[in-house]
Image (cartoon, rainbow, N blue to C red):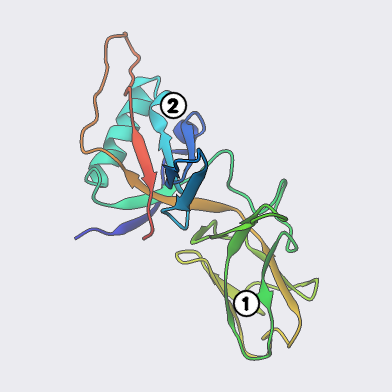
């Protein structure tokens, strides 16, 4: 049975990867030359190739072991996107992202990251925050994790504890580091051992999933 393993792909190899977000857009060209464009996916799906990071026998062995434990494409795992793994441009601030507005009754606020601000902002749900990195504020005042709220690092849900529910009209914001849930997009790793004491896996395709 497929599962999600709460384990991070080797970070030193991930930092040398290549990839980014993918969208699926359907385009129909009309007789007038104008286009009709339709988004097939509501959310982007990210892809990477981690093969660029494998340059030594040690790294190669690490990846093969990681691949075997995940059973190829069967089990998902965490991936650190070197370009996009924080709620803001720098270290997380509790004011980075707007999660919602309090009403005095709602206790659970999912973590999100918003891209853009004017024309068509994209709201991305964050499901795999990094433990210990989540900072939350209510009405601009930072709250204490464990006393005022808890965050489920397997789902990205921020839950306010009794006596600390955001009051009506109070802005709920957060800052955090996060990983992306992914799986291998191949059941076969082609290993290259042509160089002495060095090695490479030409392609290690990874694709974002929704666990």
The residue where tag 1 is placed is: 149
Task: Where is residue 59? Give x, y as percent.
Answer: 38, 27
User: What quarter of the picture does the C terminus occupy?
Assistant: bottom left
Q: Position of residue 101 (x, y in %)?
A: 69, 78
Identify the residue at image location x=22%, y=46%.
71
Q: Secondary structure at mark 1?
A: strand
Q: Residue at x 45, y 31 (%)?
A: 13
**Label 1 crowding class (10 Å Cα cut-off): few <14, some 14-19, many 20+?**
some
Question: Who comes first in sequence, dot 1 or dot 2?
Answer: 2
Q: Tell me the residue that label 2 is attached to.
A: 53
* Rendering coords of residue 3 (x, y %): 28, 59
Q: Nearer the viewer, residue 45 or 139?
A: 45
Q: Residue at x 42, y 40 (%)?
A: 47
| Residue 151 horizontal/vertical position (percent) | 56, 70
Q: Quadrant of residue 92?
A: bottom right
Direction from residue 130 to residue 41 in the image, left or right: left
x 47%, y 58%: residue: 42
Q: Residues within 10 Å of mark 2 (few under 14, many from 20)?
A: many
- The secondary element bearing badge 2 is classed as helix
């Amino acid at each position: 049975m497929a599962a999600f393993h709460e384990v991070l792909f080797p970070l030193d190899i991930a930092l040398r990867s290549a990839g980014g977000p993918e969208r699926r857009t359907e385009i129909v060209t009309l007789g007038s030359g104008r286009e009709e464009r339709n988004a097939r996916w509501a959310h982007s799906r990210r892809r990477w190739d981690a093969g660029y990071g494998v340059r030594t026998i040690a790294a190669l062995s690490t990846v093969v072991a990681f691949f075997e434990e995940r059973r190829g494409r069967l089990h998902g795992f965490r991936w650190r996107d070197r370009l996009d793994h924080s709620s803001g441009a720098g270290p997380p601030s509790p004011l980075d992202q707007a999660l919602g507005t309090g009403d005095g009754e709602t206790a659970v606020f999912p973590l999100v990251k918003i891209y853009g601000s004017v024309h068509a902002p994209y709201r991305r749900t964050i499901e795999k925050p990094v433990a210990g990195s989540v900072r939350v504020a209510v009405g601009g005042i930072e709250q204490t994790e464990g006393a005022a709220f808890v965050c489920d690092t397997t789902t990205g849900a921020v839950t306010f504890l009794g006596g600390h529910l955001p009051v009506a009209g109070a802005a709920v914001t957060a800052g955090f580091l996060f990983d992306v849930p992914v799986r291998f997009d191949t059941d076969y790793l082609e290993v290259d051992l042509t160089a002495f004491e060095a090695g490479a896996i030409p392609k290690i395709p990874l694709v974002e999933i929704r666990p």
